[in-house]
Amino acid sequence: MRRSKRVPDVKQREFAEFYRSDQAACLRAVLVSVGDRQLAEDLVAEAFTRAWTSWHKVACHPAPRAWIVRTALNARVSWWRRQRREVAWDGTHEVEALAAGDTGLDPALLAALRRLPRRQREVIACRVFLDLDTGGTARVLGIAAGTVTAHLSRAVASLRAHLVNAEDLEARP
């Protein structure tokens, strides 16, 4: 008797499609938050692994991409706690190297984002890169909606000031 090839089940196909369509966006959001491409890739891979094991919950989540990003950021915090120390970014990584590859981010923008405080970077990642509304961002980050608005406002003002100043400096002869 001839055996037919096994057709992937619905769960596997749904997850594969989710991974293909959303992995890059999740990676960009985590990269903006952590600033280290290799670390961001590891965290996103860990988050997608956890999503696969809990796919029945993640598939029903109102914002599965946000679930991935929050899980990746939580994995980083868990790693810090296990190490009992926070590894500070020493600035030795070149911003251009972080933006290399298929991130689609301007190196100047990435450098400006890295100067923002962590919570402001997380809010920018959720609001801009994941296109979540204020309420969704608040739920993902576990903060109040007003706090999201305040962090977003401060982040945009800082980015605007930095990027406008950078453009003015480049325009001078």
Image (cartoon, rainbow, N blue to C red):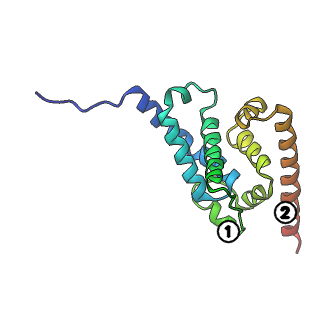
Q: Position of residue 56 (x, y in %)?
A: 50, 26
In the rendering, at what x and y percent does residue 125 appear? 71, 45
Q: Is residue 85 above or below residue 137?
A: below
Asked whether disc 1 touches disc 2, contact meaning CB atoms under 8 Å apart, the reply is no
Of helix, strand and loop, which one carries label 1?
A: loop
Name the residue: 63% across, 42% down.
69
The furthest residue to the bottom: 173
Instruction: Please state which of residues 91 and 102 is positioned toward the viewer in this rendering.
Output: 91
Badge nearest the viewer, 1 or 2: 1
Q: Residues within 10 Å of mark 1 (few under 14, many from 20)?
A: few
> In the image, what residue occupies the spot 52% across and 36% down?
51
Q: Nearer the viewer, residue 147 or 156?
A: 147
Give the x, y percent position of residue 92: 69, 71
Q: Earlier in the sequence, mark 1 or mark 2?
A: 1
Q: What is the quadrant of the N terminus in the image? A: top left
In the rendered image, the vertical position of residue 55 relative to residue 79, given as above or below: above
Q: Quadrant of residue 137?
A: top right
- Residue type indicated by callout 1: Glu
Which residue reaches farthest left?
1
Three-letter amino acid code at disc 2? Glu
The residue identified by callout 1 is 94
Residue drawn at 87 percent across, 43 percent down = 153
Is the C terminus in the top left, top right, bottom left or bottom right quadrant?
bottom right
Helix or strand or loop: what does disc 2 sit on?
helix
